[in-house]
Image: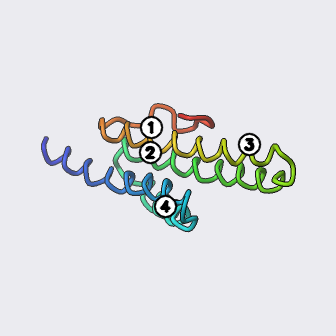
Amino acid sequence: MTEITSQAGNDTSNAKLIYILYLASLVVGITGLIGLVMAYINKSGNNSIADSHYRFQIRTFWIGLLMAVIGGITLMFVVGWFILLFLTIWMIIRCVKGLKYLSEGKAHPDPASWMFG
């Protein structure tokens, strides 16, 4: 049984790295794209805990990109600044909550959520 636990720990280490890459993308944008590629590569594993996090991470990227585009288009108006501020806070909360679930060894409870998860 300890083998299964250590294998699950190895699988979740990639998910943890992706969350960290997403957080780093708030400063260095390309790391988010690297995290997305890693999530797509690893999502078809046999670990249901990590798979739920990979799904959550993939959705986080695409929803975040949608919000960034909308924020960028409306940037000339005041609302665009608020959208981009919300996007930053939204991304931080989603990544921190995902890291919390991973550290507890839990699958993400709602990987299909649009809000904070």
- The local secondary structure at tag 4 comes to helix
Please state the horizontal and vertical placement of residue 57, each as a whole percent of the image. 51, 49
Q: Earlier in the sequence, mark 3 or mark 1?
A: 3
Q: Position of residue 44 (x, y in %)?
A: 43, 54
Q: Secondary structure at mark 2?
A: helix
Q: Nearer the viewer, mark 3 or mark 2?
A: 3
User: Quick check: marks 3 and 1 in contact, CB under 8 Å?
Assistant: no
Mark 2 Cα-neighbour bin, 10 Å: few <14, some 14–19, many ≥20: many
Q: In the structure shown, which secondary structural element does the residue marked by tag 1 occupy?
A: helix
CB under 8 Å between callouts 1 and 4?
A: no
Numbered disc in front, either 3 or 1 = 3
User: In the rendered image, which quarter is residue 106 located in?
Assistant: top left
Residue under label 3: 82
Residue at disc 3, secondary structure: helix
Whether pointer 3 and pointer 4 mark residues with C-beta atoms closer than 8 Å, the reply is no
Between the residue at mark 3 and the residue at mark 4, the CA separation in whole angstroms equals 25 Å
Looking at numbered disc 3 in the image, what kind of residue is underneath it? Answer: Phe
Q: Which residue is mark 1?
A: 97
Q: Is residue 48 left or right of residue 57?
A: left
Q: Amino acid at mark 2?
A: His
Count neighbours of disc 4 (C-alpha within 10 A) and say few if under 14, some if 14 to 19, many if 20 or more: many
Q: Nearer the viewer, mark 2 or mark 1?
A: 1
Q: Earlier in the sequence, mark 2 or mark 1?
A: 2
Residue ID for mark 4? 35
* Mark 1: amino acid: Lys
Q: Residue furthest left?
A: 2
